[in-house]
Image (cartoon, rainbow, N blue to C red):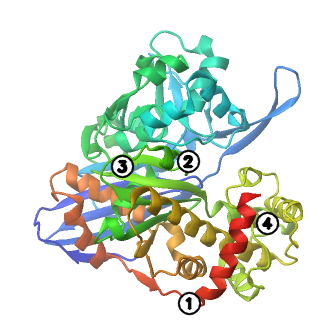
């Protein structure tokens, strides 16, 4: 990213490092407030994926286990700290870490790790939603947490551990959420911010504390979970030994919006939240609106909407399968060809493919973690009586058109639940650079789309650090900084009549 600058009224100087960990890689960004200006630049980027093991289970048959390599990620965080020292300087005011919104590690009282970190697509969770609902009614869980049911919810993960690894829950054992784990590695502190805690399906959405009722019904000891703090809280400092090793001072550790979606939404340049639909576009598409308080009505539950904790607000949203669909198509073709197809080539082929040839429901369970996404697409088309696209471009176009139409469907549900009409769509995150999908979204919804910033999660991460360290007063103060510092591109709707007709077909398909 270019070193873009923006004037700010506050003259305080401060330097921050945002560590942004996603489902397919990590990035480290330096953010500098100096002499009335703000600048941000990437200092380190690294790739990783969950790793699959096929090991014998109790019956002796191979069982796939998907795990994260936290050692690799931590080593790259240290590399990022050293890169900051070389490229920016030896002085660092604070560090903030955001991650995907699931998974964690269990540690003993002595700090020993109780196994590897399972990845959220691991198949042990496939039937855990039913296990949770068997212990507490779904309506009650939603009324308390405002979170809808997903296989990867931490409620499912910890219940599975209690059921299957109970002997490991020795006296003093702790559950450490993924972002908290890396704060723990850096500063020896275990806290979790309310944005990440909110998506576990274990936090009371109104009180922002762990729900004793849910923990009791699921058999989860309250002492297992870390304390919850507000985003912007200074929770510790970089351990002196680590600071010395990387050549920096003992910078403050600030709990940001540790759920990456919270940080991304915080960076959306929204003038009036009541009129904006925000899409954090990446591996997942998080589609939602900012509302002042949780909405846990039966209508919201029926629409499968989640109330995720934000920075002084609530993100009323729905998880939608996002870039994962095409990412997995690309991976299947890489395995077949022995080389990676470049993204511009994929977009070009999709652009020239036949429009509206077939549709998929992006959130169909068959696409959650298939062995081969191309085959899964074909099977779905045949099952729903549609002709299977015969080209790779056709497959990609089908995925993106279906995503755009699903965004429209979600927007209708959210607008009905909160009573707020959408006037403009804001797409942030890495997916905001996908101009084809951006245009499809504008066309499908019949609304202007504003795309950017691409690195919204890192931007939001840094702005919350700046709040916590007193550099800016609120996220409202951050909006003009963001607008001036980062490129924003607008896409206007076109050919909406054809998309309206496609939407009628799409809605009938979703009912199947």
- The residue to which callout 2 is attached is 302
Q: Quadrant of residue 323?
A: bottom right
Q: Secondary structure at mark 3?
A: loop
Give whichever of 511, 162 is nearer the camera.
511
Q: Give the left or right position of residue 182, taking residue 14 as reference.
A: right
**What is the CA distance from the residue labelled 4 to the residue labelled 3?**
35 Å
Badge 3 or badge 2: first in the primary sequence: 3
Q: Residue at x 31, y 39 (%)?
A: 238
- The residue to which callout 3 is attached is 257
Residue 334 badge: 4
Q: Residue at x 31, y 58 (%)?
A: 462
Say above or below: 175 vs 486: above
* Spot occupied by residue 293 in the image (x, y as percentages of width and height): 32, 48
Instruction: Answer whether labels 1 and 2 touch (C-beta < 8 Å).
Output: no
Label 2 crowd bin: few (<14), some (14–19), many (20+), radius 10 Å: few
Give whichever of 257, 321 is nearer the camera.
321
Q: Give the left or right position of residue 113, taking residue 110 as reference.
A: right
Badge 4 or badge 2: first in the primary sequence: 2
Mark 1 or mark 4, whichever is nearer to me: 1
Give whichever of 32, 367 is nearer the camera.
367
Badge 1 or badge 2: first in the primary sequence: 2
Q: Give the left or right position of residue 419, taking residue 171 as reference.
A: left
**What is the CA distance from the residue labelled 1 to the residue labelled 2?**
32 Å
Instruction: Answer whether labels 4 and 2 touch (C-beta < 8 Å).
Output: no
**What is the CA distance from the residue labelled 1 to the residue labelled 3?**
36 Å
Label 3 crowd bin: few (<14), some (14–19), many (20+), radius 10 Å: many
Say above or below: 15 vs 136: below
- The residue to which callout 1 is attached is 494
Q: Secondary structure at mark 1?
A: loop
């Amino acid at each position: 990213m270019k070193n873009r600058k923006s004037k700010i009224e506050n003259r305080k100087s401060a330097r921050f490092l945002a560590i942004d960990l996603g489902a397919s890689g990590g990035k480290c960004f330096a953010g500098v407030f100096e002499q009335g200006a703000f600048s941000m630049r990437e200092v380190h980027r690294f790739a990783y994926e969950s790793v699959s093991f096929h090991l014998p289970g109790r019956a002796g048959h191979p069982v796939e286990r998907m795990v994260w390599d936290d050692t690799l990620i931590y080593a790259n965080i240290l590399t990022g700290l050293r890169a900051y020292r070389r490229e920016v300087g030896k002085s660092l005011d604070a560090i903030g870490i955001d991650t995907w919104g699931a998974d964690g590690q269990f540690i003993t009282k002595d700090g020993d790790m109780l196994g590897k970190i399972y990845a959220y697509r691991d198949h042990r969770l496939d039937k855990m939603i039913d296990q949770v609902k068997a212990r507490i009614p779904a309506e009650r869980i939603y009324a308390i947490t405002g979170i809808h049911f997903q296989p990867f919810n931490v409620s499912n993960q910890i219940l599975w551990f209690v059921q299957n690894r109970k002997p490991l829950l020795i006296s003093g054992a702790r559950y450490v959420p993924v972002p908290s784990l890396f704060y723990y590695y850096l500063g020896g502190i275990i806290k979790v911010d309310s944005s990440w805690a909110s998506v576990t399906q274990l936090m009371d959405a109104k009180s922002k504390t762990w729900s004793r009722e849910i923990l009791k019904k699921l058999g989860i000891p309250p002492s297992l979970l870390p304390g919850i703090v507000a985003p912007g809280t200074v929770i510790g400092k970089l351990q002196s030994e680590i600071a010395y090793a990387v050549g920096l001072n003992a910078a403050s550790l600030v709990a940001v919006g540790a759920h990456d979606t919270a940080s991304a939404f915080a960076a959306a340049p929204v003038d009036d939240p009541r009129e904006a639909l925000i899409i954090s576009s990446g591996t997942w598409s998080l589609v939602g609106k900012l509302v002042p308080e949780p909405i846990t009505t039966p209508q919201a539950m029926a629409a499968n909407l989640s109330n995720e904790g934000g920075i002084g607000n609530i993100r009323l949203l729905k998880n939608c399968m996002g870039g994962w669909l095409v990412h997995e198509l690309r991976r299947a073709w890489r395995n077949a060809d022995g080389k990676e197809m470049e993204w511009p080539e994929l977009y070009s082929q999709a652009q020239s493919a036949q429009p509206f040839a077939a549709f998929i429901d992006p959130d169909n369970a068959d696409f959650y973690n298939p062995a081969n996404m191309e085959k899964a697409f074909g099977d779905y088309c045949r099952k729903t009586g549609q002709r299977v696209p015969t080209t790779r471009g056709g497959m990609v176009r089908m995925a993106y058109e279906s995503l755009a139409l699903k965004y429209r469907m979600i927007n209708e549900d959210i607008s009905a639940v909160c009573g707020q009409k959408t006037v403009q769509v804001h797409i942030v995150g890495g997916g905001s650079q996908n101009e084809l999908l951006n245009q499809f979204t504008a066309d499908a919804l019949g609304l202007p789309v504003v795309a950017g910033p691409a690195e919204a999660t890192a931007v939001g991460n840094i702005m919350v650090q700046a709040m916590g360290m007193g550099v800016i007063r609120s996220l409202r103060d951050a909006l003009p900084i963001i607008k001036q510092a980062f490129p924003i591109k607008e896409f206007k709707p076109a050919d909406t009549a054809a998309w309206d007709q496609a939407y009628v077909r799409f809605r009938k398909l979703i009912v199947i």
